[in-house]
Amino acid sequence: MFDYQAPDNLLNDRIILVTGAGAGIGRAAAKAFAAKGATVILAGRTVAKLEEVYDEIEEDGGPQPAIFPLNMEGASAHDYENLAATLEKEFGRLDGLLNNAGILGVRTPIESYDPSIWDQVIQVNLNAQFYLTQAMIPLLRQAEEASIVFTSSGVGRTGKAYWGAYAVSKFAIEGLTQVLADELENTSNIRVNAINPGATRTNMRANAYPAEDPNRLATVEAIMPAYLYLMGPDGRGTHGQSIDAQG
C-alpha cells in the first residue's frame, strides 16, 4: 500500500468536492477527508446514498458536509457552470476536487461494442470530468493551494482486450492529467495528479470480475492514504504524476 500517515488536522478548513461520493471509493474518500477536517461536498447521482454518507460523516464528528445531486451522464457544460456558481456563493473557493465518478460499460470486443454504451462511458468517464474540472478551476484558483485528483486505472496505461470504452477513457484521463498539469506548471496554486486505485473491493470490480474472491482484494479504506496525501499539503510537491494507491 501507499505508505503515508496523515495527521488528524491534515485537511482542516479545506473545502473538497468529491464525485461519485455515494458508494465505493468516493464514499470512503469523502469520509476520510471529513475525518481529517475537510468540509466535503458530496456529488453523485443517487441522493439517498449521498444522504447516508452525509449522516455517517456527521455521526463521526466531521464538519457538516453538503450534498449536490449530479447526473454526469446527462449534465451539460452549462450545468457544471451553474454548480460552480452555487459553490462560489456558498463557499467562496474550492481547495480540492476528486474526480472519482465513473462507469464500467461492458467488457466485449471492440468489433461488437454497442455505440450507445461507448458514448455513455466516454461521456461519464471523460467528457464530464473535463466539464467539471474546467468549471471548477476559477474556484480552485481562489484557494491558497488546491489539488485536482483524477481517477485512472491500470488499463488506462496498458490496454487490455475487451476493456473497450473504459480503458480508452482512462487513457484519456491520463492525458488530460498531463496536459492540465503542464498548463498549470509554475503558473498556479493548483496541482494536478491522477491516482490508480488498483484492484479494490468495489461493485465495479465485482462486475468486471464476477468470479473473483473479493476478500483477496484491498478494501477501499486501505487505499485512502494515497488520496489523503495527494489532497493534503504534504503532497504539494507532487504534480503531473499518476500514483498507484497500492504501491
Image: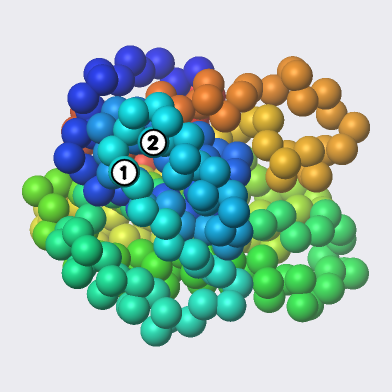
Q: CA distance from mark 1 to mark 2?
A: 6 Å
Q: Position of residue 168 (x, y in %)?
A: 64, 60
Q: Position of residue 12 (x, y in %)?
A: 19, 34
Q: Quadrant of residue 210?
A: top right
Nearest the camera: 64 or 222?
A: 64
Q: Is residue 196 visible?
A: no
Residue beneath disc 1 = 64
| Residue 188 horizontal side relative to residue 113, left or right | left
Mark 2 closeness class: few <14, some 14–19, many ≥20 residues within 10 Å: some
Element marked by disc 1 = loop
Residue beneath disc 2 = 58
Q: Position of residue 5 (x, y in %)?
A: 33, 15
Q: Is residue 42 above or below residue 228?
A: below
The coloring applied to the image is rainbow
Question: For the point 21% across and 25% down, which residue is it?
Answer: 9
Q: Position of residue 103 (x, y in %)?
A: 66, 57
Q: Quadrant of residue 2?
A: top left
Residue type indicated by callout 2: Glu
Q: Earlier in the sequence, mark 1 or mark 2?
A: 2
Q: Is residue 219 visible?
A: yes
Q: Is residue 78 above or below residue 53?
A: below
Mark 1 closeness class: few <14, some 14–19, many ≥20 residues within 10 Å: some
Asked whether the residues under the numbered discs 1 and 2 touch, taking CB atoms below 8 Å apart as contact, a structural biologist would say yes
Residue 11, disc? none
Residue type indicated by callout 1: Gln
| Residue 29 horizontal side relative to residue 8, left or right | right
| Residue 150 horizontal side relative to residue 239, left or right | right
